[in-house]
Image (tube, rainbow, N blue to C red):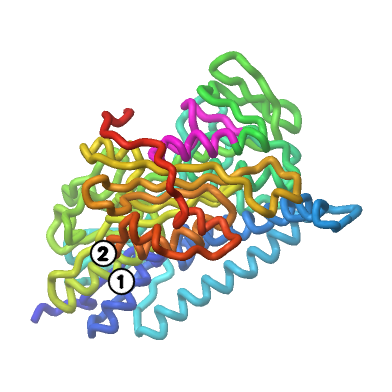
Amino acid sequence: MENFDFDLFVIGAGSAGVRACRIASSLGARVAVAEERYFGGTCVNVGCVPKKLFSYAAHYRDDYVDSKGFGWSHQGLSFDWATLKRNKDIEINRLNGIYKTILDDNDVQVFEARATVRSPHEIVVERKTVTCKYILICVGGWPWTPAFPGSELTISSNDIFEMEELPESMVIVGGGYIAVEFASIFTRLGCKTTLIYRRDMLLRGFDEEVRQFITTQISHDLDLKLGTSISKILKNENQLQVTCDNGEEMRADKVLYATGRRPATANLGLEALGMDLADNGAIMVNASFQSSVPNIYAAGDVIDRVALTPVGLAEGEVVARNLFAGPGHEVSYENIATAVFCHPNIGTVGLSEEEAFEQGLKVDIYSSQVKLLKHTLSDSKNRSFVKLVVDQTTDQVLGLHIVAPDAGEIVQGFAVALNCGATKADFDRTIGIHPTLAEEFVTMRKLRVHSQRVGRA
């Protein structure tokens, strides 16, 4: 048996890394982990959890407004950013402690320092070299902002959680998850919000009908500028002067660039080992999450497959089980449910209409816009959207999409049904819960599309 200090050394104590540590240790491996920043990774500290807490805060504004139609009245309504930030910080610190406790309780050696890779069996950490049989890299991603005149004046999705004051105005750049979520949040917290995106619809990669619907809904709540980019930013007294590529100018207190995250692989020593990396720095791995360098594996956002916390958890666990319990464990990337916590929320699982057509499938499409019972009294103009993509040949439901409050809670249950191969007939014979929005999925009878066509680019 090789004489190594550890059987597994994990770089990064985020979701994927901590899960891999726990599982490997439970299987008898000697495990160490290095974390230079914060336990829990992006999700706990500058991603899913604090963002969802901010989203809850924004929802209260809608609830207060809607309550008037139900007989409630209120005066002097105000919002205090400092209270939200303070309570958010308390909760994040609590979660940091839980992640550290998980590692300690599983006898994982923790290095609270940056680690780099010297060789397939050597890690440099705390100015010393330790040896290990296997290395697992789970360093996640980091916000990316393109370079342009004044780009150094912008803030990232990491920075936004540390703002000491709520800005009176904000420009947000981007059209993905992060951009639309923060745009929905800050406009409701009382910040004059402008969302700028270079394409003609938000959320590229989602079902086209969903994109059209949410783009329209969000445009009701803030200033949405599509087909536009920022060309430069200047500091002008206490504000930022933003110039767009079409010549339009505006002022804002903050400019948030939410243009994506890139794998944080720089300066880890990977290039010196000749490791295969993608153009954006992602580690190229095979089906077992093994890199091109023997004994080095990677999981989570750093491999840039599906940047979702539950996926990273699954990937980290599979690596640990394959290494220490025997090969054969896999991660299925089919029917991964996801949600976007904009207002209203988006929930989706399975194929979009365009993906189904691009795969050459003959599908039936059912879709409908719905006014919630709640809004018959609230006087809100918000509507909801539901959609099913059904295989004509097998009657199997291939995709399910919803834009509505608590969409993620609804789709999680339907994701189980899709993974079990549920058919449209199964949906139809299910008795709905009335009155709910979710019952729309088991009462949809009117076809919108009954044909095969070429998908759109």
Marks 1 and 2 close (CB-CB < 8 Å): yes
Looking at the figure, which quarter contains the N terminus? bottom left
Which percent across, then down, holds residue 45? 53, 61
**Distance CA(mark 1)–CA(mark 2):** 9 Å
Question: Would residue 252 appear left or right of 1 to someone viewing this image?
Answer: right
Start-end of magenta stretch: 195-216
Q: Is residue 268 visible?
A: no
Badge 1 is on which residue? 20
Q: Amino acid at mark 1?
A: Ala
Numbered-mark total: 2
> How dense is the environment of label 2, judged by Cα within 10 Å: few (below 14), some, or many (20 and up)?
many
Residue drawn at x 21%, y 37% as measured from the top left:
360
Query: Label 2: which residue?
Result: 136
Left or right of 295: which side holds 126?
right
Relative image position of residue 419 (x, y in whole percent): 30, 62
198 in the magenta segment: yes
Who's the residue at 69% across and 54% down the image? Answer: 374
**Outermost residue to the right:** 75
